[in-house]
Image (cartoon, grey):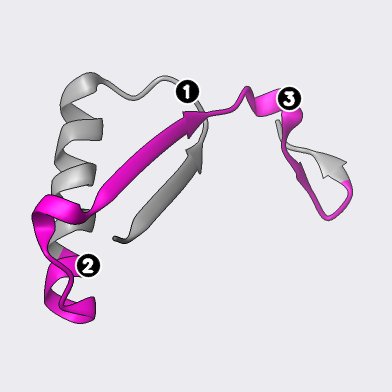
Amino acid sequence: MPIVKVLMYGGRTQQQKDDLARAITDAVESIAKAPRDQTIVVFQEVAKEHYYIGAKRAS
């Protein structure tokens, strides 16, 4: 059972998350040959001020 965790800034619409989950599930099914009904996609939205790139806070 593949579990794909997506960390991203907040602000995406539910439709965008639905579309992304579908695309990720399609890719896992196609490439990893995993059954789509056993593929889990988890979105975790993290506030932008919690991201650091090159030791600098993302802006």
Where does label 3 land, which residue? 49
Q: Nearer the viewer, residue 56 or 2?
A: 2
Residue 28 sits above or below residue 24 on the image: below
In the displayed structure, does residue 31 sit left or right of residue 7? left
Q: Quadrant of the N terminus?
A: bottom left
Find the distance from the CA under tag 2 to the CA under tag 3.
31 Å
Q: Residue at x 89, y 49 (%)?
A: 55
Looking at the rendered structure, the kind of residue marked 1 is: Gly
As drawn, which residue projects farthest toward the right? Answer: 55
Q: Residue at x 73, y 24 (%)?
A: 49
Q: Residue at x 25, y 33 (%)?
A: 17
Find the distance from the CA under tag 1 to the CA under tag 2.
24 Å
Where does label 1 land, which residue? 10
Looking at the rendered structure, the kind of residue marked 2 is: Val
Residue stretch in magenta: 27-55
Residue 53 sits above or below residue 10 on the image: below
Find the distance from the CA under tag 1 to the CA under tag 3.
11 Å
In the displayed structure, does residue 18 sit left or right of residue 9? left
User: Where residue 13 sits: x, y (%)?
Assistant: 26, 20
Secondary structure beneath disc 3?
helix
Say which quarter of the image contains residue 59.
top right
